[in-house]
């Protein structure tokens, strides 16, 4: 899909598929096109060109109860009660009034807001209000949950609560798509990832595949310089020798693996006291692929 | 319930829960009650008292007689109106008051008095009046003569008389009709003619009283002059009873210009109510939309429903609020009519005649609903382009001025001439047409003009729905990026993606 605003291309020929079940991370820096893409998937915006299929059909309000959506910019009707708000969104998605009311009450209780359920939303704290918003997205028990920057503005405690909830929904069979520019959340939650930059897809795959985008790095303790070993591209001593042993950070040559290096050391009688594989973090992968810090403002 | 109706219900509830809604709803009936109470308790006393010192002894009786005839004429007129209103015919013969309200000459008054005056008329009415009719209450005489109050010097010339009277002109004095302001004091010196008569007033305007006194003084002087010329006073007196045979025809009550005003009253009232309720409820809707935008609510809502559902739902909601306000106000007005009866009921009857035709009612309802849609959409357009109320004020103030000034001018023009150029022109301009047509409906507008104006309005609303629907969709999620004028043609040409 492509989305242009005048001369500015917000989403540029982006194609991806989200498998059913699991947690799908939609990653990118601020302004990368994450929100625009999600809005197009929800028919809030129409693509300039391209086609989209969500749950087997074109985006639209038909069957909107199968999709829960928590937008990045959040708000509530301040004069409505928490239960009324959740029930209202349930009804907007086609639930009968009684069922929406009952489901709203259950969710509000489940989120620990029972005593505030009938009070006006304007009296709730920010964390409580965000739970009400999430309840509004969940009231129809959606098959697909779209969370746009769900952790923004939450304190660490509530971030942990939300992370747990996302995993719980995923275990319950829902597909969760969430966008974020905070790689730690993606690292903890996502089964699969889509990384976009300036509206274009940069990477799609699972976390291992993402990390494989960067050469593995090793730390070894050896008596001799490891640079002559097969598969070693570079090695740098991390400090002076101690009892004849020196720590080295080793960079492997493309196509080489840490397992092959270990085998070569063992077979060649190369003495080792430490052999530690260091996987790249998603943050490092992001920096490597995009060339900028995801948390920096555009 | 469809999403559109859900939005309408939420919109309605949100507005109905605000304090300002109830204040506005109650403001109108409170104003009616207060106006009635103030009229009853604070209205100035009717008429005035007057005092005459007549050193000649000739003029005061003539003035009293003139004022008595005028008072009798007033009674006769009220009696004729009452008899016509309750369809009461006299027992026997042709009573002066039986022919309906008209101008009653001095001869008519004399005939009325000769036939027994008010007591006889009241007795006849009592026998013939229907059970529902209230008793006839003769109007109190406008002017009542009193004797010079104690302390007023009447025997030492006009200067002393005026000086001693001056404090009394600032207060009410006791009369046979209750306390009244002392409106006029007259001093006629013994050598009146050579010396002037002196008149003192309390500063309020009693032009009829002063004119009657002036005429009687003139006539007395002229009679004396004619007598000095040797003309027979008896012949003069006979000649004075001769009056020009004039038949003055005035439209009966509830006809002519009065009829037009009465018939216009209710539709004009509807037009005013439409204007007031539109301004108030439009502002509420605008505030609600801006709150949704600033609260970042809209994205979550339009993920569930289409922007069009949201737009139409808001319009239905605000239309319902307007209808509730109007119905409540009409209900209060009807209740006030029952409570205060009398004048209001008599006033309402001819006014209601203007909406007795089902077609007029249909037209009123159409123009009311269409007016609400037409103007409410302008409020929605402003709301969809504004991030906060300060932004909105930039659009709102010019729009309200552009709307209300011509409407106010048109409404006063309608009372002068419903078919005048301003009302007719505005009837064809869609944003003004609901007000102009509602205001004119009571005085009779040709069906062709009503249909034409309604059709133009319908087409305009259709266009408005398309354009404002696009504007709404294009601007809902564009916080901080106000619509630029150069974007408008593009928006009108095609729907936003």
Image (cartoon, coloured by chain):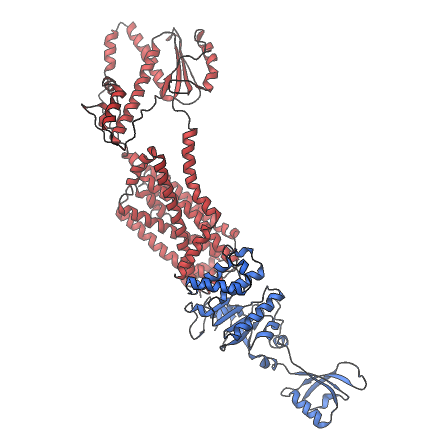
Chain colours: A blue, B red
Indicate whether B333 appears above or below A171.
above
Residue A215: quarter of image = bottom right
Report the side of A79 relative to B269 (left or right).
Answer: right
- Write the residue at 38% across / 50% down: B372
Residue A248: quarter of image = bottom right
Residue, far right: A243
Indicate whether B442 appears above or below B71.
below
Residue A287: quarter of image = bottom right
Across and down, in percent, residue B402 comes to 43, 46
Near-viewer residue (A158 or B263): A158
- Write the residue at 46% across / 63% down: A102
Across and down, in percent, residue B179 comes to 42, 20
Residue, far left: B93
Report the side of B388 relative to B316 (left or right).
Answer: right
Across and down, in percent, residue B343 comes to 33, 33
Report the side of B36 relative to B117 (left or right).
Answer: right
Indicate whether B412 appears above or below A285.
above
Q: Is residue B41 visible?
A: yes
What quarter of the picture does the C terminus of chain A occupy? Answer: bottom right
Indicate whether A106 appears above or below A252.
above
């Amino acid at each position: 899909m492509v989305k242009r605003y005048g001369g500015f291309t917000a989403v540029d020929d982006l194609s991806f598929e989200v498998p059913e079940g699991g947690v799908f991370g939609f990653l990118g820096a601020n302004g990368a096109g994450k929100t625009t893409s999600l809005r197009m998937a929800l028919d809030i915006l129409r693509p300039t060109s391209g086609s989209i299929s969500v749950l087997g059909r074109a985006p639209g309000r038909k069957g909107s109860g199968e999709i829960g959506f928590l937008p990045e910019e959040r708000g509530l009707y301040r004069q409505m009660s928490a239960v009324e708000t959740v029930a209202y969104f349930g009804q907007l998605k086609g639930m009968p009034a009684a069922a929406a009311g009952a489901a709203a009450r259950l969710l509000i209780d489940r989120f620990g807001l029972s005593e505030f359920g009938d009070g006006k939303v304007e009296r709730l704290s920010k964390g409580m209000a965000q739970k009400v918003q999430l309840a509004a997205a969940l009231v129809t028990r959606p098959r697909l949950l779209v969370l746009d920057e769900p952790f923004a503005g939450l304190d660490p405690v509530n971030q942990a609560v939300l992370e747990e909830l996302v995993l719980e929904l995923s275990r319950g069979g829902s597909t969760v798509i969430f966008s974020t520019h905070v790689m730690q959340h993606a690292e903890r939650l996502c089964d699969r990832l889509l990384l976009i930059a300036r509206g274009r897809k940069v990477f799609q795959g699972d976390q291992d595949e993402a990390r494989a985008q960067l050469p593995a790095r090793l730390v070894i303790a050896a008596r001799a310089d490891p640079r002559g070993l097969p598969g070693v591209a570079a090695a740098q001593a991390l400090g002076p020798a101690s009892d004849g042993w020196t720590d080295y950070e080793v960079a492997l040559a493309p196509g080489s693996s840490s397992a092959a290096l270990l085998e070569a050391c063992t077979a060649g009688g190369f003495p080792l006291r430490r052999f530690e594989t260091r996987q790249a973090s998603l943050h490092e992968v992001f920096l490597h692929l995009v060339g900028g810090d995801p948390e920096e403002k555009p | 319930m469809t999403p559109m109706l859900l939005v309408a219900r939420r919109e309605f509830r949100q507005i109905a829960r605000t304090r300002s809604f109830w204040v506005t709803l109650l403001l109108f009936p409170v104003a009616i009650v207060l106006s009635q109470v103030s009229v009853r308790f604070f209205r100035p006393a009717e008429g005035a008292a007057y005092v005459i010192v007549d050193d000649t002894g000739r003029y005061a009786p003539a003035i009293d007689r003139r004022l008595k005839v005028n008072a009798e004429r007033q009674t006769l007129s009220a009696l004729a109106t009452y008899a016509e209103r309750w369809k009461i015919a006299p027992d026997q013969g042709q009573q002066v008051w039986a022919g309906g309200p008209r101008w009653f000459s001095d001869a008519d008054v004399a005939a009325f008095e000769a036939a027994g005056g008010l007591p006889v008329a009241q007795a006849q009415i009592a026998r013939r009046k229907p059970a529902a009719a209230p008793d006839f209450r003769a109007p109190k005489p406008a002017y009542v003569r009193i004797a010079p109050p104690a302390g007023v010097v009447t025997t030492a010339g006009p200067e002393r008389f005026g000086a001693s009277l001056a404090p009394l002109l600032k207060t009410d004095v006791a009369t046979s009709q209750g306390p009244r302001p002392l409106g006029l004091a007259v001093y006629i010196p013994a050598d009146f003619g050579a010396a002037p008569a002196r008149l003192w007033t309390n500063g309020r305007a009693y032009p009829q009283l002063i004119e009657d006194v002036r005429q009687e003084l003139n006539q007395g002087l002229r009679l004396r002059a004619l007598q000095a010329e040797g003309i027979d006073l008896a012949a003069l007196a006979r000649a004075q009873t001769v009056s020009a045979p004039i038949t003055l025809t005035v439209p009966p009550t509830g006809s002519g210009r009065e009829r037009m005003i009465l018939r216009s009253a209710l539709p004009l009232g509807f037009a005013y109510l439409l204007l007031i309720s539109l301004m108030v409820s439009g502002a509420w809707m605008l505030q609600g939309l801006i709150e949704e935008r600033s609260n970042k609510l809209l994205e979550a809502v339009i993920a569930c429903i289409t922007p069009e559902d949201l737009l139409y739902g808001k319009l239905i909601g605000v239309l319902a609020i307007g209808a509730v306000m109007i119905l409540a106000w009409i209900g209060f007005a009807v209740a006030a009519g029952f409570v205060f009866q009398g004048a209001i009921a008599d006033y309402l009857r001819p006014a209601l005649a203007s909406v007795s035709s089902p077609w007029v009612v249909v037209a009123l309802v159409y123009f009311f609903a269409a007016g609400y849609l037409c103007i409410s959409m302008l409020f929605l357009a402003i709301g969809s382009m504004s991030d906060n109320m300060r932004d909105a004020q930039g659009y709102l103030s010019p729009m309200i001025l552009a709307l209300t000034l011509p409407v106010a001018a048109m409404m006063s023009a309608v009372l002068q001439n419903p078919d005048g150029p301003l009302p007719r022109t505005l009837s064809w301009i869609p944003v003004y047409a609901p007000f102009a047509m509602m205001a004119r409906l009571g005085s009779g507008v040709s069906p062709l003009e009503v249909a034409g104006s309604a059709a133009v309005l319908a087409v305009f609303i259709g266009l408005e729905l398309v354009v404002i629907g696009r504007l709404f969709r294009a601007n809902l999620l564009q916080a901080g990026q106000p619509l630029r004028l150069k974007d408008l043609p593009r928006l009108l040409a095609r729907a936003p993606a």
